[in-house]
Image (tube, coloured by chain):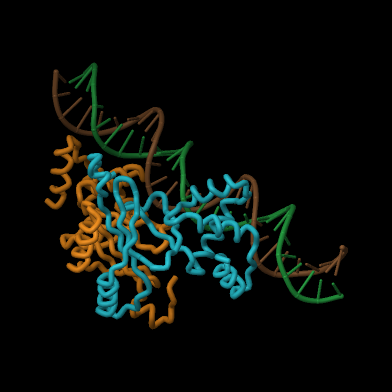
Chain colours: A cyan, B orange, C brown, D green
Amino acid sequence: MKSDDFKNFLSKRGLKMTRERQELYLEILKFDNHFDVDSLLFQVKNRGLKTSKATIYRTLQLLMEAGLIRNISLSVSEAHSPRYRVCSKLRAYDHLICTGCGKVIDFDKQEVCKTCHSVTAEHGYKLEAHSLRVFALCPDCQEKGLTSC
Amino acid sequence: MKSDDFKNFLSKRGLKMTRERQELYLEILKFDNHFDVDSLLFQVKNRGLKTSKATIYRTLQLLMEAGLIRNISLSVSEAHSPRYRVCSKLRAYDHLICTGCGKVIDFDKQEVCKTCHSVTAEHGYKLEAHSLRVFALCPDCQEKGLTSC
DNA sequence: GATGCAATTGAGACTCATTCTCTTTAGATA
DNA sequence: TATCTAAAGAGAATGAGTCTCAATTGCATC
């Protein structure tokens, strides 16, 4: 069962795998990539599941702590629409984000990790994570003559 | 005069350099690095200048469009405390952020730019900007035995 | 199966950064 | 001076995310 990872994490923490948590996680797995809370809420309601915003946020928090999803910001200005995304196997922390349509491509470049390591070492820091966001216009949006939003 | 850049931008746009705009920009220039809206508001009120939040946000928006300040996110999770920062000459888009105390060190690595160019080229995108955030624990926080917040 | 208890949920109130609205002000121009 | 318009100020509105608390659930024990 796909939700075993989550269950294991929960029991290690002395927490329970409830129906709500299981169903939410299964819904999340249906997104093949990025999703935001609104679309998750919509999808969940669509299936006739009753869930409150609070439960969703609580479950997302747990899934993040379990390392099963990750929270990334897809906008230059941080004021709006944070998004969650399903954590894929490739552990990509680098995102190519179209400033026209918002499409996201994940990538994973060794060079970036190396840079992070060298920068932290240089300053005596202890590396924990990094996030590289590249903002650019995708071919479709270039064709449509869109400039950045 | 330091605020000439801003004045030029405004007149190009058919906008006026008002006393409020000038004073706000001068206050901002006094921060040698990052600042948030709250501390700007505090500093401005401290000098006996009357300004409303709305004016501050409107002016920050203009300064961003003028390329004189930049908006960066300093937290892994995007939910809290967005910050603005004065745009320095070195045009650093890369930040080393301490997850313990929040201190920020700017850096500027050629490799990152190269990576961004190659990634966008690879996908046919047109590069606009990038932001690399490296989250790590600074020496002081390591000493204090802090783990990431 | 019933009981007890802690974990969990749902609903909606709350927070707080940011934006919007609307009225007033100020400065340029006729 | 009268008029016009951009800009400012005050505070209401917005909206993502959090908190609260009563009601419910899951699970261990009887």
Depth check: B12 or C25 in front?
B12
Looking at the rendering, in which quadrant would you find the C terminus of chain B?
Answer: bottom left
Count of marks, rendered view = 0
Q: Is residue B27 left or right of residue C30?
A: right
Classify A9 as above or below A107. below
Residue beneath the point at 20% across and 63% down: B113
Depth check: A3 or B38 in front?
A3
Q: Position of residue B147 (x, y in %)?
A: 44, 76
Taking the view exactly as shown, the residue that stands out farthest to the front is A1
Q: Position of residue A100 (x, y in %)?
A: 29, 45
Can residue B24 be seen? no
Residue beneath the point at 50% across and 68% down: A65
Q: Is residue A21 left or right of residue B78?
A: right
Q: Position of residue A148 (x, y in %)?
A: 26, 45
Q: Position of residue B31 (x, y in %)?
A: 25, 60
Q: Quadrant of residue C21?
A: top left
Q: Quadrant of residue A116?
A: bottom left
Taking the view exactly as shown, the residue that stands out farthest to the bottom is B143
Residue beneath the point at 15% across and 38% down: B11
Depth check: A130 or A6 in front?
A6
Depth check: A17 or B84 in front?
A17
Q: Is residue B1 left or right of residue A22?
A: left
Can residue A97 be seen? yes
Classify A47 as above or below A73. above
